[in-house]
Amino acid sequence: MQNESAKLLLDATPLAVTLWDKNLNLFDCNEEALKIFKVKDKQEFLKRFHELSPEYQPDGQKSKDKTPVYIEKTFRDGKYSFEWMHLLPDGTFMPTEVTLVRVAYEDAYVVAGYILDLRENKKMLEGIEKRDKLLLAINRFSAILLESTNEENFEESLLQGLQLLGESLETDLVQIWQNEVIDGNLHFTLKYKWMSEIGKKAPDVPIGTPVPYSATDDWEEKFLREFDLTPGMIIEQVYRQPFPNRFLANLSPFLLRNIERPALRALVFNSFQSFLTRNVMQYDFKRYPVYFTGSIAHHYREILEEAVRAAGMQLGGVVRQPMDGLVKYHSENN
């Protein structure tokens, strides 16, 4: 009866709960854990629990090394709380706050782990922090411009302001373009720019570069006409339909044919940089080379190599199709 009551209490808890014995074995969980970690049953959860964390935690330590240390500490001290990065079966990172508590269970003690999903909290806090940083940067930007006394000081002050905006938005490039009429046609011309150290390694667009509006309009029209798309259809495919990555990959040939355009080359470079920061840097990338598989990495290898070098990583190799690597492995080991 006591065990039944304990089970009811566990399953009523709105947090994921895990139970660990003295031998550091995970032996039970509640229903909420199955929902949060998106697994079908307890058997799968218990079997795959250690796969539900990345190999390395954000502090650079291996997950499998930290887990037993924290559980042993809780058996000794009674309670311990910490932040932990989990990894869902679909590859999504899930920041959590874990509270371990030593509790009486039957005739012994066990450790109960309460796991709180912090994704919404982190997202809200990051939004507030970013807003505050942006408001502070705008205020400082305005003060700098007001303090400038002549044209030379104004340009220097403007560049300082662009740097403040770039750093507050955590971006590597900030530009100011100005409308100009050249030979009777309306252009937008690059007048000022600020780049971070990483941004300086990207393909450069020189100050004074003019771009005719007519060229951009034609370019957009060609893109939409080639794929029989409208802006609304793109939004529908990317945000509401399954497999948006496949849809976007089908548009890649147009980008590849026009990759010599500085703006497009910079777009690809910055996209690779964002991918490396968000995904690869979660692991111990300084100790191991990074490998890529897929047609995007294959076709844009030159730009990918630039982004990898700029991020301080070592490129191990690029394979267009997974099968290529499997064939090579088995041919060399038979």
Image (cartoon, helix red, strand yellow):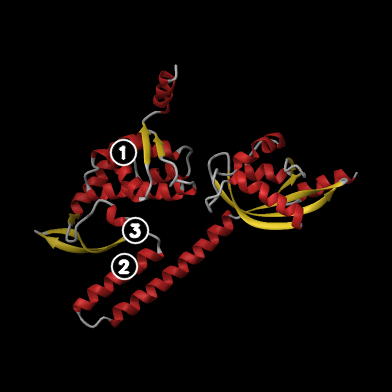
- Badge 3: residue crowd in 10 Å (few <14, some 14–19, many ≥20): some
> Which sits earlier in the primary sequence, circle 2 or circle 3?
2
Of 103 and 173, nearer the camera is: 103
- The answer to whether mark 2 and mark 3 are in CB contact below 8 A is no
Which residue lies under the disc numbered 2?
162
Task: Identify the residue shown where x is 55% and y is 49%.
Answer: 61
Which residue lies under the disc numbered 1?
301
Location of residue 192 (image quadrant): bottom left
- Badge 2: residue crowd in 10 Å (few <14, some 14–19, many ≥20): many
Task: Identify the residue shown where x is 28% and y is 52%.
Answer: 202
Location of residue 251 (image quadrant): top left
Amino acid type at circle 2 is Leu
Q: In which quarter of the image is the N terminus?
A: top right
Amino acid type at circle 3 is Asp
Query: In the structure shown, which secondary structural element does the residue marked by tag 2 occupy?
Result: helix
Residue 137 picture location, percent across and down: 39, 71
Residue 329 picture location, percent across and down: 43, 23
Task: Identify the residue shown where x is 40% and y is 50%.
Answer: 274
> Which sits earlier in the primary sequence, circle 1 or circle 2?
2
Residue 297 picture location, percent across and down: 35, 37
Which residue lies under the disc numbered 3?
172
**Image position of 103 (left or right of 149):** right
208 w.r.t. 13: above or below: below
**Image position of 101 (left or right of 124):** right
| Distance between mark 1 and mark 2 Cα atoms | 31 Å
| Distance between mark 2 and mark 3 Cα atoms | 11 Å
- Badge 1: residue crowd in 10 Å (few <14, some 14–19, many ≥20): some
Of 166 and 256, nearer the camera is: 166
**Image position of 268 (left or right of 214):** right
Location of residue 237 (image quadrant): top left
| Residue 129 appears in the picture as rendered | yes
